[in-house]
């Protein structure tokens, strides 16, 4: 083998939106697996809002990517060489392979992906971290009951589109908040949401009054900022706010805007709770099984946005997330499946 | 009877700090109890930060005081006439008698106060709403475990001084945040707190790093604003933040300052939950019994700040709360006990 591995390694900690120059594009020869290792060729790279946080220095829920390290990324690939008992050449696998074309892995955190069960890219979405985030965040922290009203922001995104669909399966009234008419139309027409609010052209507070007249029992927040603050004014008594992300704030140069209406938690005896999907690692199998069953039964749609290109398209594709240009799970396909 | 009842009735909705002119001082003859009523002479008036919120228009956890209504207030008094089967002349009673010298009541929400069990004013503090707030807010929402670190703001106030003492009884490490050296000294020397931070002269973040080196497991917040925001940066994993009040924000003319560091809830898988003591009404007996037992055993001190005067001293006494001038439960004594 004399193949070349193209990688993106972190070069600088961005201020505001990441720029191409925040990574070095590095070439190195593809290595050979040592005993206990496997070599994976990456097919699909996962683009996630959380990547922005991983680029910052300082304590968070996982360590930051260090300068000089391959940029952290979830990915699906094919095993092209193996000296690991658990994986054979030709296996499709999912894991944290990073923004690169090939990854040598010791198999930790690597799981097999069965293309007969779902398209490979879906292992980065509905059957991957976004699916687990939506499922456990909604079920475990949101605790919606049939008939209650669930509102989700970033509703057309990877996590949001699943949160809303799962809430519908549970029997809730579901209102999505998303940016743009076409996303909103998709939520209602294709995913079965009861209503969608276009925060770019509509008055979110007024629309919530109409579509959640009895208040919001569960708010699943992916965006933070003004939308969080507005939904807080419409909480029902005993509401649960799930803090999953705050994409509106990730590229802030100014200090984060805190939710000025947080005292609504007191007035409504409500709670606001942060969730990190990794805490549910020992229950992923349960989540995958349930979501795969709903997918197979046609009760859940895996909305995805697949960009075809090469690893060099990573920076520009990542920025699509922060511009709100993706619909559903954004992945970058950098190699053929077979 | 031809006694005169002096009352404070709400005259205007304040902007910022309440002023004397926000109430009308009204005189009317003391009425006679109708069948099923009792007449109470008020002895102790309770001064509470929540009173500021009751003066605002708009939806909250209880209806606002309407313009022209007697200002809402908890009070302890003596029954001076009764046509109610449950109460006899000479009984001491606690209830929402309002800012006035006499109150005609139908007995709803009125409970007897036994001066043999605790000083009458304590029925407005440790055995009253502040006690119930501290007890249920800490136990039910904070859920502290022995060995954990509990931080409380407004620590020298009616609720805060109890929260810290109860947490000590449970076996926690307790850090109080209060304004001024003498309050801080009292917390440590008299109430047994492990440490106290004077937010007026000390760097709260730095002191928390020292006194809560493993992070804050339970934060009981009475103040909001910058202190809440600072404590959020020091949460331990799985921390519980109890939102009980936000006295720093009640008289704001500018919009409330939201907690910019709320994403610490996500990083630390923490929750922030509002509490309203009235929700625990059906468990008050349990709370009173436990607190009375601890009082009797000398494990709990009822810290109180009794101002002697007349009903006309109400506005100025209330302002002492917002200036942080009180230590412990602030009450205004407007009549003799017997």
Image: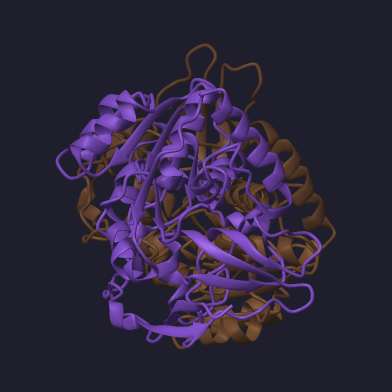
Chain colours: A purple, B brown
The answer to which image quadrant residue B58 occupies is top left
Q: Nearer the viewer, residue B188 or A9?
A: A9
What is the quadrant of residue B281 in the picture? top right
Say which of B164 and A308 sits in front.
A308
Left or right: B332 with respect to B77?
left
x, y percent for residue B142: 65, 55
Q: Is residue A180 left or right of residue A244?
A: left
Q: Name above or below for residue B334 compared with residue A19.
A: above
In the image: residue B82, left or right of residue A168: right
Q: Position of residue A302 (x, y in %)?
A: 46, 37
Q: Can residue B72 be spotted in the picture?
A: no
- Up the image or down, A85 lies above or below A171; here it is below
Q: Residue B41: percent from the left, percent from the top?
A: 50, 37
* Above or below, B71 relative to A39: above
Residue situated in front as seen by the camera: A61 or A204: A61
Q: Nearer the viewer, residue A299 or A63?
A: A299
Q: Report the residue that reaches farthest toward the top.
A: B35
Residue at horizontal 22%, vertical 36%?
A182
How many numbered tags mark residues here? Answer: 0
| Residue B255 picture quarter | bottom left
Task: Check the picture and name the quadrant holding the N terminus of chain A.
Answer: bottom right
Give the image location of residue A139, x and y in percent.
Answer: 59, 37
Residue plotted at (34% across, 82% down): A22
Residue B249 visible to the viewer? yes
Q: Is residue A206 above or below residue A18?
A: above
| Residue at 52% over, 75% down | B178
């Amino acid at each position: 083998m004399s193949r070349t591995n193209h990688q993106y390694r972190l070069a600088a900690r961005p201020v505001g939106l990441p720029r191409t120059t925040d990574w070095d594009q590095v070439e190195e020869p593809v290595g050979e697996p040592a005993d206990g290792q496997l070599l994976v060729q990456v097919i699909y790279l996962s683009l996630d809002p959380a990547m922005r946080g991983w680029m910052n220095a300082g304590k968070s829920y996982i360590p930051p990517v260090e300068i000089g390290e391959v940029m952290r990324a979830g990915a699906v690939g094919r095993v092209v060489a193996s000296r690991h008992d658990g994986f054979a050449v030709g296996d499709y696998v999912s894991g944290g392979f990073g923004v690169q074309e090939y990854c040598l892995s010791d198999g930790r955190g690597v799981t097999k992906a069965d293309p007969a069960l779902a398209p490979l890219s879906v292992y980065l979405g509905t059957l991957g971290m976004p699916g687990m985030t939506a499922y456990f965040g909604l079920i475990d922290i949101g605790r919606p009951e049939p008939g209650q009203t669930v509102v989700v922001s970033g509703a057309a995104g990877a996590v949001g589109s699943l949160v809303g669909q799962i809430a519908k399966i549970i029997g809730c009234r579901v209102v999505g908040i998303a940016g743009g008419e076409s996303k909103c139309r998709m939520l209602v027409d294709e995913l079965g949401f009861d209503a969608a609010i276009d925060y770019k052209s509509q008055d979110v507070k007024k629309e919530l009054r109409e579509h959640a007249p009895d208040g919001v029992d569960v708010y699943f927040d992916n965006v933070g900022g003004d939308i969080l603050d507005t939904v807080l004014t419409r909480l029902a008594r005993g509401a649960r706010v799930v803090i999953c992300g705050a994409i509106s704030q990730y590229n802030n140069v100014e200090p984060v805007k805190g939710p000025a209406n947080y005292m609504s938690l007191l007035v409504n005896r409500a709670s606001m709770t942060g969730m990190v999907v990794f805490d549910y690692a020992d229950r992923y199998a349960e989540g995958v099984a349930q979501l795969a069953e709903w997918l197979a039964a046609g009760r859940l749609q895996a909305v995805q946005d697949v960009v075809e290109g090469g690893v060099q398209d990573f920076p520009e594709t990542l920025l699509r997330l922060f511009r709100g240009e993706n619909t559903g799970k954004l992945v970058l396909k950098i190699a053929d499946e077979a």
